Amino acid sequence: MNLQRYSFKILFTILTFVLCLNNIYSQIEKVHPPNWWIGFENQNLQLLVKATNINKYNVEINYPGISLIEIHKADSPNYLFIDLKISNLSKEGDFEIIFTRNDEKLSYNYNLKKRRSFELQNEGFDSSDVVYLITPDRYANGDYKNDVINGLKENKINRFDNYARHGGDIKGITKNLNYISDMGFTSLWLNPVLINDMKEGSYHGYATTDYYTVDPRFGTFEEYLELSEKANKKNIKLIKDIIVNHCGLYHWWMDDLPFEDWLNFQENYLKSTDKTINQNTVYSNHRRSTIQDIYASKVDYRGMLDGWFVTTMPDLNQRNEFLAQYLIQNSLWWIESLNLSGIRQDTYPYAEKEFLSNWAGRIMKEYPKFNIVGEEWSYNPIRIAYWQEGNNNKDGYESNLKSTMDFAMQKAIYEGIFEEENWDTGLIKIYESLANDFYYKDPNSLLIFNDNHDMSRIYTQMKEDIAKTKMALGLILVLPRIPQILYGTEILMEDSDNPGDHGLIRTDFPGGWDNDKHNAFNGKNLDNDELEMQNYLKTILNFRKNSKAIHEGETMHFAPVDGVYLISRKKDDETVLYIVNKNNSNKELSVERFSELGIDNMFFTEIYSGQKFHWKGEINLEKNSSIILRNY
């Protein structure tokens, strides 16, 4: 009898263990998107469900206003894709998704919220804004407790290493919103803050390892939302950096890819013994011109799109309809969750252009006030214009994209100011580049900049010449464009020790850490040049906030003569002039040549100095200088 009891206990223990084990392996690991909203114009929602052998389960949903349309099995047995339709008659709250297999039942509560009304959606960024670009790890450390997170692959801080994490975070940005607002910036573009659980170089954010999770070293979702809400109260718009072309090598799905074609060159990755792509990788040829080239070979065209960007960034295949839907819904989720004003889409031409059109079109249909800017790193205005919505493309392609990054003008400004003046060099480069605006559907919606997180800082480009740096900055702030300024430009941050080095470009902003000797937020220990440049930008930016002539005025410019170039912006009774004199001597500038502007005998204020004068006949331009004038 005792032996029987003993045997029964052993059998019971084994059965219990097996049942527990089965239960553990049957738990739902992920449901993406993690929640959704009632009220989208497109009522379809596709859920990605991740759990061991989940494709063996049936799915049931019984909730008013929700229809279960179709269930899709992936190539991996551990995924289901569930198509739902969410009627506007649905109610806020949790509904139960029931998974059944034989006698086993799993339940998952999914949350529905009511979408914010059109009136409560933030306005998109436009030519009335100035965008402040921040690399969060290098701006300000608002919470030292999240510097190191155990369990992540890179879990140390080293501010002496340009490619290590330095500890800046979302809370640090939020704490300094007063500074950002007082400076006159009206939009914030943050380099990505989603989790990058990479072994090294994780600080920059461009190797996402979960599209729905904020990197805990940057903070929490709640802190991200707090930043958005507090920025909104200060009339600062928030722009999210998104990457749909690639993810990080250690993204959670890399150990169990849903479909055989989730990645480009997926078979090469799966065959590699160390789960990298080093030996068998096909990298992108980076020939971006093949996207528009009517003579391009298929091998070159697909080589551009399918190749991996770098070893640690697997290339996503947006031709897979489930991945495409996942990425589109992810963007919508972040826009609605944070009430974003815009998206900056990284490496724009590297993703499938048909997908990009659908992605941008879906977003803009749901958020008509929104804006998206795509990164097309090209110095050819024809290629830049191709990506802007409404462009008359020969192949009939419609991008649905409002804005692109104007690298062509960026290059022209650098060359125009830095080069010696000759017939075809110097300021004429700027003039000719602006003259190309006839080709753009909407030049006012292009994003212009002197530098960014990927290119040498403008002060370094200008060989640390403050006058030339002011020329470049003043120009982008009056052009018919949306200007973007990289954090630290206002205090002449540079990368002169190794120009173009990404880690050095993204140097820490002084004052963002408790023990910093210099503090740009309050001016402590800044030298005279740094303070003067900070005050210069602050003055121009705050003037620009209220200048309708710059925001939406008519543009006229005059071909440079004798090293002098003038641009006019005019709306109603406001006239703003930008004038640059590149000569090494003062210059008397006659108003006669500019008579069609109607400025003869007009009174002007020089914005930075506040000096007032009457332009009748000639005005004196100081050598190597630029000025911004407004009539009064």
Image: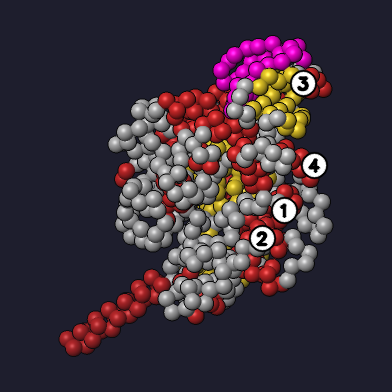
* Residue that label 4 marks: 438
- Identify the residue position indicated by label 3 in the image: 572
Q: Which mark is residue 288?
A: 2
Q: Image check: 360 left or right of 17?
A: right
The residue at the point 49 percent across, 73 percent down is 277
Q: Position of residue 309 (x, y in %)?
A: 55, 63
Q: CA distance from mark 3 to mark 2?
A: 42 Å
Disc 4 to disc 3, C-alpha distance: 23 Å
Q: Nearer the viewer, mark 1 or mark 3?
A: 1
Residue 385 visible (yes or no): yes
Closest to the observer, 587 or 576: 587
Of marks 4 and 3, which one's residue comes earlier in the chain?
Answer: 4
- Residue 445 rendering spot, x and y as whole percentages: 69, 40
Residue at left offset 39%, top offset 50%:
162
Q: Quadrant of the N terminus?
A: bottom left
Label 4 close to label 3 by CB (< 8 Å):
no
Give the SS element for disc 1: helix
Residue located 35% across and 51% down the image:
161
Secondary structure of the magenta portion, mostly? Answer: strand
Mark 4 lies on a secondary structure that is helix
Mark 3 closeness class: few <14, some 14–19, many ≥20 residues within 10 Å: few
Pointer 4 or 1: first along the chain: 1
Give the left or right position of residue 140, taking residue 612 as reference. left
Region rendered in magenta: 600-629
